[in-house]
């Protein structure tokens, strides 16, 4: 009879193989993985293997290269994933005995069509177990960017960009934070529950304002409180954009890039569900998630529409939120697969899209109204540069410095900017723009 851990390892390997072939968002594939495993311990271990392998991918490949008689780029993708998972269990996960990690990796290869490589897998893992100090990394002084890239497993182009922008120490802190376990944050729905009631029902640790860290994420997501709409999953940094927007009851709001709806729901709750929120998005599938969230949270002021937000509608709104599609470099801790799916060549198209959405959204803002432009990016070109270019070329647009609206928040200056490793939660940016009355 196959051991339980082997079921988790098999499911994790199959998911990693699927991701290699499709580069689909890992969250979509993890949902399928959860459905394929009946035991909660299997799910947790399989998720550990998948997310850990993606998170430490570059370091794992570097280690394989020190012990494999064949170059890493010549190894079969499945064999390489088995080696990555094996080294992860030996060097990162602390609950798997090293001998078990080696034995199960070899057996996994035999069962999953890689029997001919089982000897290589056994040799690499045993050599690493015996001589971990054989692994040498680039000198941290002479080759600081390359050292951080390999040792902390981030693409070199991104590390170089961050060192130039943030400096060496802050970049190192950001990379370390991205490799830590990303907690599940919950935001209270004050229209449906109270902090006291939520804490009485779930195992939670209080965070800022109405945010709580789930000590048992699975319990929270399968709870009656979740089904009754008493909370929404949302990172604390994501909520700053809506706080900066400051929507009021009775207003007409445009959420220009709304799905899957975390910020949309937050707007509705701050408005006491009194007013009109047009929730626009191009994706039917993501809008379906928004509708499901809206129904679960019992919010009636949200009206989803399938709409390209780079095109104006002719309708004017009191406030507009542009949570622009972006590189997502502020959320690489939560989405480790994204660090391998991004490249510098993607930025020109992203920036063009961001500029067109911001211009169209501002055209739908009434004179005297407020627009907030936000991203989950850490990149200057997607954040400050977009806003400052827009202000320079738009006579009736003015920056309203964020600290005037959120004066007690240490993360806020001219703009909102949160940084992993320095602030709680993900990296996020937000700017508040006022439309001058003519």
Image (tube, rainbow, N blue to C red):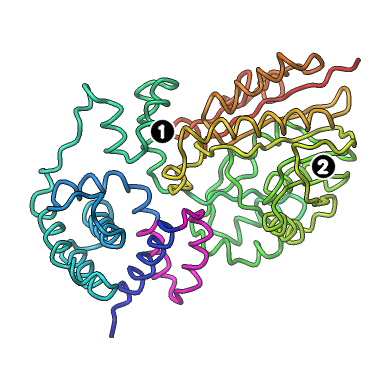
Residue 328: x %, y % from top left: 53, 39
**Pointer 1: what residue?**
174
Residue 434 covered by magenta stretch? no
Q: Secondary structure at mark 2?
A: loop
Question: Residues at badges 2 and 1 in contact (C-beta under 8 Å)?
Answer: no
Residue 372: x %, y % from top left: 72, 30
Residue 151: x %, y % from top left: 27, 38
Q: Secondary structure at mark 1?
A: helix
Q: Is residue 330 above or below residue 29?
A: above
x 65%, y 17%: residue: 388
Question: Residue lying furthest front in this view?
Answer: 74
- The magenta region covers 22-50
* Viewer-nearest of discs 2 and 1: 1
x 40%, y 56%: residue: 20
Left or right, 65 with reference to 81: left
Q: Pick the residue in front: 205 or 157.
A: 157
The image quadrant that residue 289 belongs to is: bottom right
**Pointer 2: what residue?**
271
Residue 367: x %, y % from top left: 88, 23
Quadrant location, the N terminus: bottom left
How would you classify the magenta stretch by its main secondary structure? helix
Quadrant location, the C terminus: top right
């Amino acid at each position: 009879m196959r051991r339980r851990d082997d079921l988790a390892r098999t499911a994790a390997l199959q998911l990693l193989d699927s991701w290699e072939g499709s580069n689909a968002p890992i969250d979509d594939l993890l949902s399928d993985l959860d459905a394929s495993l009946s035991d909660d311990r299997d799910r947790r271990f399989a998720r550990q293997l998948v997310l850990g392998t993606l998170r430490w991918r570059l370091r794992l490949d570097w280690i394989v290269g020190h012990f494999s008689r064949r170059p890493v780029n010549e190894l079969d993708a499945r064999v390489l994933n088995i080696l990555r998972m094996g080294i992860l269990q030996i060097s990162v996960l602390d609950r798997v005995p090293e001998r078990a990690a080696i034995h199960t990796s070899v057996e996994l290869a035999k069962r999953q069509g890689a029997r001919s490589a089982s000897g290589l897998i056994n040799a690499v893992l045993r050599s690493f177990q015996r001589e971990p100090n054989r692994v040498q990394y680039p000198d941290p002084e002479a080759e600081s960017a390359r050292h951080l890239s390999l040792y902390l497993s981030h693409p070199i182009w991104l590390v170089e960009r961050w060192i130039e922008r943030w400096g060496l120490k802050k970049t190192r802190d950001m990379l370390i934070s991205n490799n830590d376990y990303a907690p599940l944050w919950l935001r209270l729905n004050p229209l449906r529950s109270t902090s006291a009631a939520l804490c009485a029902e779930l195992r939670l640790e209080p965070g800022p304002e109405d945010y709580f860290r789930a000590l048992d994420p699975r319990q929270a997501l399968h709870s009656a409180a979740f089904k009754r709409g008493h909370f929404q999953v949302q990172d604390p940094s994501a909520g700053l954009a809506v706080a900066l927007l400051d929507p009021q009851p009775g207003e007409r709001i445009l959420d220009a890039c709304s799905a899957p709806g975390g910020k949309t729901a937050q707007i509705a709750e701050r408005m006491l569900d009194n007013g009109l929120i047009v929730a626009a998005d191009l994706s039917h599938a993501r809008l379906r998630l928004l509708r499901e969230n809206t129904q679960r949270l019992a919010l009636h002021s949200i009206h989803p529409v399938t709409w390209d937000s780079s095109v104006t509608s002719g309708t004017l709104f009191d406030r507009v939120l542009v949570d622009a599609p972006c590189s997502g470099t502020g959320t690489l801790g939560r989405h480790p697969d994204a660090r391998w799916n991004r490249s510098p060549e993607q930025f020109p198209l992203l920036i063009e899209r961001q500029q067109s959405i911001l211009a169209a959204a501002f055209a739908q803002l009434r004179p005297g109204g407020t627009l907030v432009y936000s991203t989950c990016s850490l990149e200057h070109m997607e954040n400050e540069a977009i806003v400052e270019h827009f202000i320079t070329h738009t006579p009736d647009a003015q920056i309203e410095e964020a600290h005037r609206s959120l004066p007690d928040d240490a993360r806020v200056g001219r703009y909102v900017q949160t940084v992993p490793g320095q602030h709680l939660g993900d990296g996020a940016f937000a700017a508040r723009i006022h439309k001058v009355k003519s």
